[in-house]
Amino acid sequence: MAIPSPPTTHLVYLHGFRSSPQSTKARIMATRVARDHPAVTWWCPQLPSSPRQAMDMVARGTAAWPGARMAVVGSSLGGYYATWLAEQRSCKAVLLNPAVFAARDLARHVGTHALWHDPMQQVDFTREHVDELHALHTGGPADAARYFLLAAKGDEVLDWREMVQRYPGAQQRLLEHGDHGLSDFEDHLDAVLDFLALA
């Protein structure tokens, strides 16, 4: 008989490229966690454009968190980051249309871009940042049971088939249509929260 894992007491949300803590999914999750799980520590940082700096910040910010009781949720590029963190800390991870080959896909986006939620703010993405993404790539999940994949076949940015192949054995919810931003995220939030088993 399997011993149930302890409830999750610490949760970090990692947004995607050109996104922010003001993303719709991040705000939906923040509201739900605050309402139904007030004892859970919630952190959704604004990630710097440098992948190395972003993961250094996240690693420092979660260093004191208990690995067995923490989890990470990542969207798009944040899903790539979440995989790195989950492998570093052996914690649960929820991946929302995650980038699988982030260095490959973002190499063509080198340049200056406005943030989606605040066009007045800009992000500079460089060739060095592409190299940093390469350095963060991990192998297959050490424990697929710690992963939950939510992938939309209608994703207009990333290929859902690469997502499925990247996380064999993980709990997977495939949406027949949908979009990259998961505009129907609220419809799937209960499944996400059930997997996370928040305190």
Image (spheres, rainbow, N blue to C red):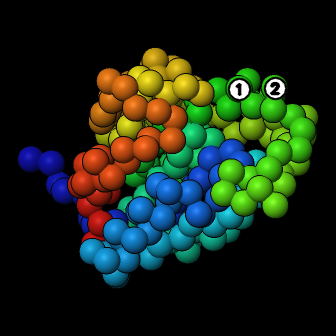
Question: Label 2 near label 1: C-beta < 8 Å?
Answer: yes
Is residue 10 visible from the viewing direction of this image?
no
Whole-percent x, y for residue 17 in the image: 69, 45
Whole-percent x, y for residue 177 in the image: 37, 26
Element marked by disc 2 = helix
Is residue 71 visible from the viewing direction of this image?
yes
Q: Is residue 122 left or right of residue 189?
A: right
Quadrant of the image containing the C terminus: bottom left
Q: 188 or 98, which is in the foreground? A: 188
Q: 69 or 50, which is in the foreground? A: 50
Residues at marks 1 and 2, CA–CA distance in whole angstroms: 7 Å
Name above or below for residue 170 compared with residue 17.
Answer: above
Looking at the rendered structure, the number of numbered marks drawn on it comes to 2
Q: Is residue 171 left or right of residue 166?
A: left
Residue picked out by circle 1: 105
Q: Residues within 10 Å of mark 1 (few under 14, many from 20)?
A: some
Residue at point 55%, 25% (across, down): 156
Q: Amino acid at mark 2?
A: Arg
Residue picked out by circle 2: 108
Whole-percent x, y for residue 169 in the image: 33, 28
Q: Residues within 10 Å of mark 2 (few under 14, many from 20)?
A: few
